[in-house]
Every structure is written in structure tokens, then in C-alpha cells.
Amino acid sequence: MADRDEMDAVEGGAQDEPRRKGEQRKQGWAFEPEKTVAAGTRTLVVGPYLTERARRHAGEPATSRGAQARLDEAVGLAAAIDLDVVARTIASLSDIRPATYLGGGKVEELGELCKADEIDLVVMDCALSPVQQRNLEKAFAAKVIDRTGLILEIFGRRARTKEGALQVELAHLDYQKSRLVRSWTHLERQRGGFGFLGGPGETQIEADRRMIRDRMAKIRRELDQVTRTRGLHRARRQRAPWPVIALVGYTNAGKSTLFNRLTKAEVLAKDMLFATLDPTLRALTLPHGGKAMLSDTVGFISDLPHMLVSAFRATLEEVIEADVILHVRDIAHEDAEAQGEDVVAILRELGIDPHDPRLIEVWNKADLLDEDRREAVLNAARRIGQGAAAAPVLASALTGEGLADLLATIEDRIARDRRTMEVKLDAQDGKTLHWIYEHAEVLSRRDEEDGAVTLEVRGDEATLERLGRRLAG
């Protein structure tokens, strides 16, 4: 395992310092909570996936995502926090065992692999119960975390704002409270939680649970205040009034690169899962001079833990209340279709219908398509456009291809709820002319010989009413 000083440096929640230092002095893998998985840890990634026949038998929905693609994504998640993935394997399951998730033979096989490769951490790309997690740790003699624990670890590393850190901690505590179970035969291996909880004995478990409940209640009160503040900011923006455009999409689909290209901002944009966590807002200028606010949000992923959707609901209200929602898709990815379905499922959970007229699909990373694939993608976009309000826009945030079409599509979508009016200004009325360019869209301009200006202006009802009062006054 990595040295203790490096582990101490890992970001955590509110911590009980004496207790934490006591935990650090204990030896062995069993006392390393999820928050202290250090960079460089020798890791085995296991993809324990039900066969299609087993999925049908269990009543689970069919998936278009292949086992290898799912495993590759899990490896990508591990790489996002710099784990050293020294081995990976797919375990095809005919059913799920209550005690260990995997069958006995596979558990034994992986245990030998862990021993031979000196594995410190096993990432199981599934959701494990506390009992399954504990039994696998005993069998592998290594720390085990499941998909939820891994995603929570990534979110913990990425959170930069107070709100993001609080949301991640709340989700992590919700996850850890179910992990405080008594190990009757190995009290020295009593699991802790969130870096400052743990220790053997039933009394201590109850104390830990009480600490978790108290901390969660405190975080919820703080988040309520953050939500109220965010609501006030949103109300202020609505009075501006600038429409809000929200970016959503699968993690690593290129949302932040698109955000930077459109707004000339410098938000972190890397070829890495969950590079963006905290929401960012920037002004955007539309083709006819209108202004909008563009919001970059956390990326979605398949099997996104429900507790994270709940924790980030305040942040995702930017999406729920947006005037336009851009669903950014990595159209060059082999699992583009399945990723799109996962995003739609989460949008449904947020109360957004997949046929919502505010939605525009942006088929990003067109620069990675060869000629044949590009033609097929363009044909598919045209077919969708025949029955929808707008065809998907093929674009490349990296090269800028298709972004003019995207901005025009956004402007058209916003204009659905707007009306136009013709305005004639005297040559001396430069103040009103400036106001119009600042607050509305100028669709056309005609300069008269006497210096007067005739404009075709588009805006929402409130803006045009304000313009009318200026002209009348």
C-alpha cells in the first residue's frame, strides 16, 4: 500500500483528529476506508456480469452494453483516481450468490490471482452488500470496493466548492452507514467509515451510527441554505432575463471542451471520467447578439448511485429549470447508444421527458469519425430530424466543426417562446439603440439616409414590454 503520509493528504469530510490518528497507527489492509485509497495502489478490476440468459431469468432489462465495454469503463473509473490497474478480468455469472456475489470457484481463482500479483485493492464493478464485501475481503486478503464506492471516491477527489464537498460527503455517509456491521468472528476487522469512524464492538457501532446520523442532519441543513442561495441567484438571473442552457451527457462525452469552446472559458477538460463535478456558469453570445447563460454539469454514468442523484439534486436543478438542454454524446464511442440511454434514464429520474422540446442532441467528437461512419451518422441524424423538432447536431468541440449550426439551433429553440417587433429610432437615440443590443436580439438593421435606424428585434414578452415603455417615454 502507499505510504501513510500520502494517505493522510487525501481529502476527507469533517474528521475527529485523535480518533483518525489512532486509526492510522493500526496495521493492515482492513483499516483503510474508501477515502484513503492512494494513488499507485496495485489494483484488480473484476467485471462480474450476468449472462443475457441470467438477466432475463432475473427479470432485469436487456442491455446493449457489451461486457468488455463495461469492464473498460470500470478500468477508466479506477484510472481516474490514479489506481495502478495491474489486472482485469470478466466473470460471467449464471446467478448472484448472497454470500460472495461470485461463485466459490471464481472466488478461489481470484484469491490466487490476488496473491500472485500482490493485489492490494479489488474493484468489483457491481453493487455489493456489506456482507458480500466483507466476505470477499477475507477471501482475497485485500481491500474490496464496489462500483458505488469507487464513484464516491472519484467524486470526493473532484469536489472543489463547498456545496460539492457537502453533497459528496452526504452521499458517502449514506453509503457508509450500511457498512457498519459487526464482524462476530473477527472483531479486529471491524470496518470503519469515511475516514474517522470504526473500531470493534457493538457499542462503538451504535456510536458510529449516531455520529453519522448527526453529521448527515447537519449537512442537510447546510445544503438547504445553499439551495436557498442558489434559488435566489437563479431568480436574479431570471429577472435579467437571460435564458439558461444546460449541458448534460455521459461522463467524458466532451461537455467541458464544448463549454470552453462556446464561452472561451478555461474549465478543466481532460480525457478522464468525471473531470467536471462542480457546476459552472458562463455567458454565451448567440448569432443575432442575444445573450444566454451556459451551465456545465456533472457527467452521468451507467448505474449512477441513487444517493448521488439525490445529493446532487440541488445542483441539477440548473438542468431541470433550463430553457434549453444540450444532451452531449460521444458519437464516436462504441457504446454511444447505450450511453445515451443511460443519460435519458437519469433525466427521467429528474422529471425530464426524453421528448421534451427543450432537448437538443449534440453528437460530439465528429473529428474521430472516418468517412463511412460519418455518412452513416449524418443519415441517422436526418432520419431523426424528420420526426422530431430538431435533428441532432453533428459537431466537434475540439475542432469547432458544427458549432455555428449548434448555436443557430439553440437560438431557434429559444425563439419559440419569443416574438418580434419592428423599431424605428431617431439618429440621436443612441442610448436606446445600445439598450436593445444589450437586452434583445437584433434580427435585421436598416440605416436610413436621415440617420434613423430601423430594427427587427426579437425578445421575450417582458423584454419587449420594457422596450415599449422606453419608446413611449
Image (spheres, grey):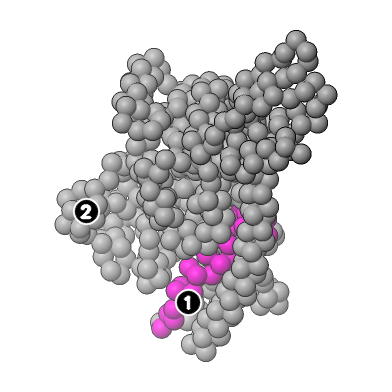
Residue type of the residue flagged with mark 1: Leu
Q: Disc number at residue 180?
A: 1
Q: Mark 1 falls on what kind of element?
A: loop
* Start-end of magenta stretch: 156-184
Determine if the magenta segment contains residue 162. Answer: yes
Q: Quadrant of residue 443?
A: top right
Where 262 sits versus 116, above or below?
A: above
Residue 266 percent across, percent down from the top left: 68, 36
Q: Is residue 438 visible?
A: no
Between 241 and 351, the one nearer to me in the picture = 241
If the image is split into quadrants, where does the N terminus sit?
A: bottom right
The residue at 62%/73% (across/down) is 221
Which residue is painted at 52% across and 59% down in the image?
A: 313
Q: Does 84 appear in magenta? A: no
Foreground disc of the pair 1, 2 = 2
Q: Could you tell which of marks 1 and 2 lies nearer the N-terminus?
A: 2
Indicate whether 75 appears above or below 288.
Answer: below
Q: Secondary structure at mark 2?
A: helix
Residue toward you, 58 or 205: 58
Taking the view exactly as shown, the residue that stands out farthest to the right is 428
Across and down, in percent, residue 384 comes to 33, 29
Q: How would you classify the magenta stretch by its main secondary structure?
A: helix
Residue at the image position 72 percent from the left and 13 percent from the top: 448
Q: Position of residue 43 (x, y in %)?
A: 48, 51
The circle on residue 139 is none
Name the residue beneath numbered marker 2.
55
Q: Is residue 382 left or right of residue 172?
A: left
Q: Is residue 360 something one can see in this rendering? A: yes
User: Which amino acid type corresponds to the residue marked 2 in the rendered image?
Assistant: Arg
Q: Where, by quadrant of the figure, is residue 15 drawn?
A: bottom right
Decide if residue 282 is on the left or right side of residue 217.
right
